[in-house]
Image: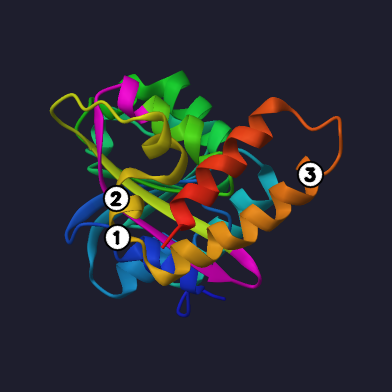
Amino acid sequence: MNEQTLSMRLERVAAQVPAGARLADIGSDHGYLPVALMRRGLIAAAVAGEVALTPFRAAERTVREEGLEQHITVRLANGLAAIEPSDGITAVSLCGMGGETIRDILERDNMRLCGKARLILQPNGGEQPLRRWLMENGYRILHEEVLRENRFDYEIIVAERGEPVAYTDLELYFGPLLMQARSEAFLRKWQRRLRLKQRILAHQAAPEEVARHVRWISELLEP
């Protein structure tokens, strides 16, 4: 993967960034996502935020080598602290972190978003608590998808502020739109997850929550 060729996961994230957006890519790593979108003429401006010095410098180098310093600002900052009011951010991407980490980043500095930005989230696990935070903070899920890359299952969740919505426990666990669509990738993910949880359940010390999830998944997969 480089600034011209994104991974399949980041391509799917890129597809959810509105045309002409002013993007804040938080945890931008090498800055590949904003650079690729800018090179394709799909966004107006971007901020690449990184909390760690090494990826921050890598993103700076990528932006500099592509000659995009006038369009992409790279900032060393913790989470949404990378965003300034003058940036006029309309979309925020947070990718490749645990769902709880994404939730905590949003919770800590959510006021910086002014409730207007589209959230494009790609959690590595922890989707349930992340969806709960979105629901409890007035965000409606607009799009969800599952993809498998390099033997890992990834979910992408897109949300915007809107009318209050109440998701059930099952919808928070599986994803309200994913449950409706029941794509092949979604069903295969939960078939694999069911086998894993059944192995855990075989041990006497397995938490009661595991048994509940096994029941939910089994019912989901029933024809």
Residue 77 shows in the view: no
Element marked by disc 2: helix
Amino acid at pointer 2: Leu
Location of residue 196 in the rendering, given as x and y in whole percent from the top left corner: 72, 53
Dominant SS of magenta comes to strand
Q: Nearer the viewer, residue 134 or 170?
A: 170
Dot 3: within a 10 Å radius of its alpha carbon, few (fewer than 14), some, or many (20 or more) residues? Answer: some
Evaluate if marks 1 and 3 touch, with contact meaning CB atoms under 8 Å apart: no
Q: What separation in Å lies between label 1 and label 3 (alpha carbons)?
A: 28 Å
Mark closer to the chain start, 2 or 3: 2
Colour style of the rendered protein structure: rainbow
Residue 125 appears in the figure: yes
- Label 2 belongs to which residue? 177
Against 83, residue 35 (above or below) is below
- Residue 201 position within the rendered picture, expressed as x and y whole percent measured from the top left: 76, 41
Q: Which residue is mark 3?
A: 200
- Circle 3: element type: helix
Which residue is labeled 1 in the image? 181
Placement of the C terminus among the 4 image quadrants: bottom left
| Highlighted range, magenta | 134-152
